[in-house]
Amino acid sequence: MKSHAILPRSSSYQMYDNMVNENMSFGKTGIISSFRAIYSTDFSGQNNVELQNSFKPEFRYEGYYDNLANNYNQYSAKSGEDDPIMNAIEKTGDAINNAAEKFTDELMFLVEMYGASIDFYRNYSDMKEANWLNSDKYFHAKANFFAAHRGPGGVYFAIHFSNLREIWDQNIMGYPRSDSVLDQKANSFGREQAKSYAPDQFMDALGIYRPKKLPLTY
């Protein structure tokens, strides 16, 4: 097998590196704009001839670079014609974008669930600390209210954790079903109110459950 020397880095490669460093975009727009810029400067007209001449014969693959340059010239001359290289770049950019978006969405979902778990723990601790008469439903609603503000992951955690807690209270703690129904009503109310009120408006949003004279700390 005949070995080939490595092609020297040309101005086109350097320009591409610069654009990538400035853009740092792995999406379709960044990739396509970078390659279009290279096509229009290095692989068209007189610039293309100068670029070919900048390579010494011993550094050129047998006919490969000439064919590549000619293809790019044809692409520049027939901008309306589909180019297989451009199509491949577009598909690659789309695939990377989709994978990145999916990974980001899944990661954010987990982050929101974790944040919701903190909201529930904090409100449970506050309920125990306040030890205020008839405040149970208020803290139920408040935990769900803040969890829902986390996003879809927070809502998911709030719903399932609330259900599990009521199962525990009925079957393990022996609380009556009627109490569980009222708890679930408060849970759902808190999540619904999160759609209309900002997090710092929780006292107004949950006013029907907030006991009178409960310290403002809660």
Image: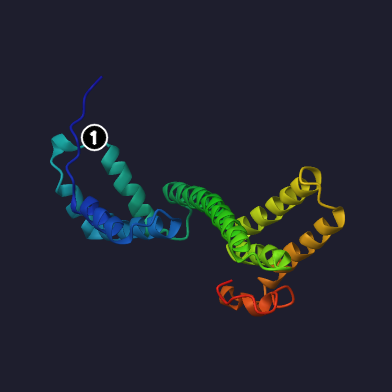
Residue farthest to the top, as pictured: 1
User: Is the C terminus in the top left, top right, bottom left or bottom right quadrant?
Assistant: bottom right
Question: In the figure, is residue 100 to the left or right of 201?
Answer: left
Q: How is the image coloured?
A: rainbow
Question: In the figure, is residue 115 to the left or right of 85?
Answer: right
* Residue 91 vs residue 191, the one in the foreground: 191
Element assignment for label 1: loop
**Where's residue 176, x and y in %?**
85, 53
**Where's residue 48, x and y in %?**
24, 54
User: Is the N terminus in the top left, top right, bottom left or bottom right quadrant?
Assistant: top left
* Residue 172 vs residue 3, the one in the foreground: 172
Residue type pointed to by label 1: Tyr
Q: How many marks?
A: 1
Please name the residue shown 82% across and 58% down the image: 179
Q: Which residue is mark 1?
A: 61
Question: In the figure, is residue 31 to the left or right of 22?
Answer: right
Give the image quarter of residue 187: bottom right
Please name the residue shown 81% across and 62% down the image: 182
**Where's residue 127, x and y in %?**
63, 62
Please name the residue shown 73% across and 73% down the image: 209
Give the image quarter of residue 15: bottom left
Please name the residue shown 17% across and 54% down the image: 50
Counting other residues with Cα less than 10 Å from the Cα at mark 1, is it few (<14), some (14-19), or many (20 or more)? some
Residue 194 drawn above or below residue 52: below
Question: In the figure, is residue 141 to the left or right of 74?
Answer: right
**Where's residue 74, x and y in %?**
37, 53
* Residue 92 vs residue 164, the one in the foreground: 164
